[in-house]
Image (tube, helix red, strand yellow):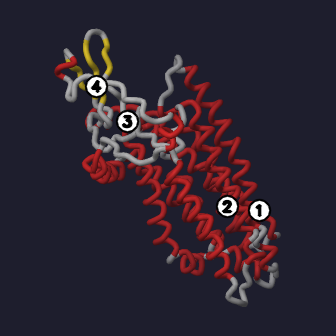
Amino acid sequence: MVIDLTFIHYRPQAIATFLCIVGFVTALFLALIPMVIDRETSTWRLFYTSWAIPSLFAMILAFLFYPETYFIRPPVAFDGRVLVQSATEKVQVYEDWEEVPGGKALPETPNQSPWARNLKFWGLTRGGWKAMWACYSQVLGCLLNPLIFWVAILNALVFTSMLSIRETYSDILMEPRYQLSMNTFALVHLAGALGCLIAWPASGFVLFCVINRLAKRNFGVRDAEHYLPAFILPIITGTLNIIIYGIAVERKWHYMWIYFAYGLNSFTLVSLATANTLWVTEAFPRWAAPALVVLGSVANIASFGVSFGIMPWIRSQGHANADIEIGALIAVVGCVAIPIAFWGKKMRQQIHERWGISEMGALRPQ
């Protein structure tokens, strides 16, 4: 939605703003959970019951008031010919209006006021069910695309580090060495909120300046590879936060180190999500939606499977060793961005040359 509502030069800041604000507000609410529920009674059900109401309200608002971004372009006369662009971005050239299916488009009769027309949310898009079904084959194609698959694996590893921290921090902070109350260790989410807030300028404004500088050095041409510097910070912080957490737990450092690692992990999640979104949607704009599906599904499927093995892994290796191994994997997979920066453009052009003519499911306007 954010991509379709913004121009290309606004997207780094728009996506970073969206992800950071959502992460910040979510972390603040999580910090307030102990004030709402009681672990010794059944009042924890109140949390789910109360949040069902705003969730339903948000869904209704999205359905009724979110504007459709599926643009239908009417036939236009150009240079003595007629250009017709389909809903899937395919362009047909006709010599005369008589050859155009449906003939020359006439203006609609103004039988309703402009404000009423803007509020109308029903209707059919011309892509049809055939275009929808084509998206599934594109999801498979994006999964096999090496320039997207490596990002999905990196995303899955960062999710694994998140699980390693968030499955264990509460039990650790309640152990005799710290003996923190539930109300106190829940404040770790404030560190997460701060991490999301710091990620806003780091993954938005700074990246915006870097991309503009690279584009100017490239004679004003913005390549998809110019978005690769966005991965530098999340790869570094993603490696450091899980290693710091593992060593802090193993060596019984002050609990503020755990808070710091948690906040750094939130910073990593938001900044990596921004980098992922920008890279896959600009490298393969026709397949933006299927690429985002691959990123989300691989990360969630992998993290769901890993969640069953985190505790046995920690028990067999120890916190420090297990988390250092996760950090090392993040660093190794992250280094794949280096050869992509040098040879990714050629590979991307080859992929576009072979499959770029496919209009299946290309519902997003360029």
User: Helix, strand, or loop for circle 3?
Assistant: helix
Gap in angstroms between the C-alphas marked 1 and 3? 41 Å
Find residue 100 and report its horizontal and vertical position in percent.
21, 24
Residue type, label 4: Val
Which residue corresponds to mark 4? Answer: 84
Q: Is residue 327 visible?
A: yes
Gap in angstroms between the C-alphas marked 3 and 2? 36 Å
Q: In screen coordinates, is 4 left or right of 30?
A: left
Which residue corresponds to mark 1? Answer: 190
Gap in angstroms between the C-alphas marked 2 and 1? 10 Å
Image quadrant assignment for residue 43: bottom right
Find residue 257 and report its horizontal and vertical position in percent.
78, 64
Of the image marks 3 and 2, the number of the one nearer the N terminus: 2
**Cβ–Cβ under 8 Å for marks 2 and 4:** no
User: Helix, strand, or loop for circle 4?
Assistant: strand
Q: Nearer the viewer, mark 4 or mark 1?
A: 4
Check residue 269 in the rendering and tell me which mark sits there, or answer none.
Answer: none
Q: Residue at x 34, y 46 (%)?
A: 124
Residue type, label 2: Thr
Q: Residue at x 71, y 76 (%)?
A: 170
Q: Nearer the viewer, residue 342 or 258?
A: 258
Q: Nearer the viewer, residue 340 or 62?
A: 62
Residue with the most extreme front position: 111
Gap in angstroms between the C-alphas marked 4 and 1? 53 Å
Residue type, label 1: Leu
Which residue corresponds to mark 2? Answer: 26
Q: Residue at x 62, y 47 (%)?
A: 18
Question: Label 4 crowding class (10 Å Cα cut-off): few <14, some 14-19, many 20+?
Answer: some
Question: Label 3 crowding class (10 Å Cα cut-off): few <14, some 14-19, many 20+?
Answer: some
Which residue corresponds to mark 3? Answer: 348
User: Helix, strand, or loop for circle 2?
Assistant: helix
